């Protein structure tokens, strides 16, 4: 399944799988951007992200992180 910047939930799940012990709220957007664009399934233009998109992904990832650690 190809991922784009609009797949916040799916990206969040993949980030949780690849960085299971990382609290998403401690990750800088620049680092998270690099992690997202490095995902094998990611097929979007890296330049098309913005703060709003990254924040949505971070919040989705944070929810997945909380659910997996409760």
Image (cartoon, grey):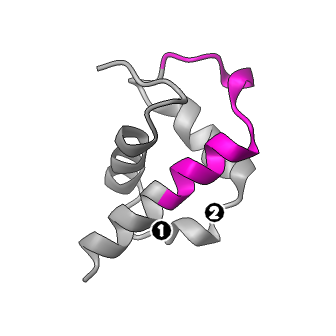
Q: Main secondary structure of the magenta part?
A: helix
**Marks 2 & 1, CB-CB < 8 Å contact:** yes
Per the image, is 17 magenta? no
Q: Quadrant of the N terminus?
A: top left
Q: Residue at x 64, y 16 (%)?
A: 45
Q: Indicate the position of residue 24 as horizontal and vertical percent values.
A: 53, 65
Q: Which residues are magenta?
A: 43-59
Q: Indicate the position of residue 6 as horizontal and vertical percent values.
A: 50, 30
**Dot 1 crowding, Cα within 10 Å, few <14, some 14–19, many 20+:** few
According to the image, label 2 marks what residue? 27
Q: Residue at x 56, y 42 (%)?
A: 35
According to the image, label 1 marks what residue? 22
- The quarter of the picture where residue 26 lies is bottom right
Q: Quadrant of the C terminus?
A: bottom left
**Dot 2 crowding, Cα within 10 Å, few <14, some 14–19, many 20+:** few
Q: Is residue 49 left or right of residue 12?
A: right
Q: Is residue 52 left or right of residue 59?
A: right
Q: Residue at x 50, y 72 (%)?
A: 23
The residue positioned farthest toward the bottom in the image shown: 70
Q: Indicate the position of residue 28 as horizontal and vertical percent values.
A: 71, 59
Nearest to the observer: residue 45 or residue 40: 45
Q: Indicate the position of residue 52 as horizontal and vertical percent values.
A: 69, 45
Which of the marked residues, 2 or 1, is nearer the chain's N terminus? 1
């Amino acid at each position: 399944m190809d991922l784009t910047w609009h797949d916040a939930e799916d990206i969040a799940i993949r980030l949780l799988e690849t960085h299971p012990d990382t609290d998403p709220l401690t990750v800088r957007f620049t680092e998270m951007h690099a992690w997202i664009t490095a995902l094998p399934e990611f097929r979007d233009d890296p330049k098309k992200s913005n703060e709003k998109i990254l924040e949505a992904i971070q919040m989705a990832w944070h929810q997945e992180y909380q659910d997996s650690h409760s």
